[in-house]
Image (cartoon, rainbow, N blue to C red):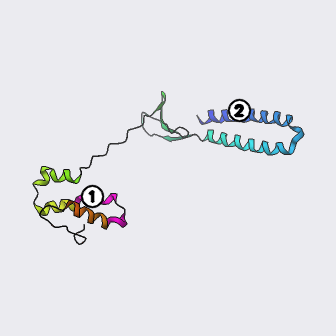
């Protein structure tokens, strides 16, 4: 695969060199201006050639069925190469995140209702630590706890305040 690309790049360079010589011959009267244009042209062609040569990243698979994996850097596609040829791998969908219940849903659940007040309070603090706190910037964590504590205080329990903060 690499040598095929090298051969195509060499042919492309030869064709471009011939084109450049023809253009240089046609512009021979304005040599200084043409030299700058030719330099830009050569750099552009060299860059495109290098991009073409390094388009693919090949990694050995080390398995019995596939001989290597190929990443096409231009398109982002990944291919599996085996004895029969090259097969494009399909993109995997992102895993669905589990829906987190809101605090009112937690309070109304039968499991929560079966807990005693102390266990319910521990569950409330755990909910804040696991669900609410990761979504709050660290410098606003105290304010978030005060708001959560005031909004979710259990019926027979006064708000805990900062002392009971998890």
Disc 1 + disc 2, Cβ < 8 Å = no
How many marks are shown on the rendered structure?
Answer: 2
Instruction: Give the image location of residue 19, x and y in percent.
Output: 78, 33
Query: Which is nearer the eye, 72 or 28?
Result: 28
> Taken as a whole, is the magenta stretch helix, strand or loop?
helix
Mark 1, other Cα within 10 Å: few <14 / some 14–19 / many ≥20:
few
What's drawn in magenta, residue-wise?
126-141
Mark 2, other Cα within 10 Å: few <14 / some 14–19 / many ≥20:
few
Which residue is under mark 1?
130
Residue visible at 77% across and 45% down?
39
Which residue is under mark 2?
11
Sequence order check, earlier mark of 1 and 2: 2
Secondary structure category for the residue under label 2: helix
In front of the other: label 1 or label 2? 1
Query: Which is nearer the eye, 75 or 63?
Result: 75
Q: In which quarter of the image is the C terminus?
A: bottom left
Residue visible at 70% across and 33% down?
12
In the rendered image, the residue lying farthest to the top is: 84
């Amino acid at each position: 695969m690499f040598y095929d690309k090298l051969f195509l790049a060499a042919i492309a360079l030869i064709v471009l060199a011939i084109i450049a010589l023809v253009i240089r011959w046609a512009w021979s009267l304005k040599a200084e201006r043409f030299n700058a244009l030719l330099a830009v042209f050569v750099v552009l062609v060299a860059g495109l050639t290098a991009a073409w040569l390094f388009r693919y990243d090949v990694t050995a698979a080390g398995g019995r069925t596939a001989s290597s994996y190929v990443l096409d850097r231009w398109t982002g596609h990944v291919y599996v190469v085996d004895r029969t040829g090259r097969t494009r791998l399909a993109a995997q969908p992102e895993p669905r995140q589990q829906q987190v219940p809101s605090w009112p849903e937690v309070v109304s659940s039968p499991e929560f209702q079966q807990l005693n007040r102390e266990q319910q309070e521990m569950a409330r603090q755990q909910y804040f630590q696991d669900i609410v706190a990761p979504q709050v910037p660290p410098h606003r964590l105290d304010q978030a706890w005060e708001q959560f504590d005031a909004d979710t205080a259990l019926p027979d329990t006064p708000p805990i305040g900062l002392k009971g903060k998890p």
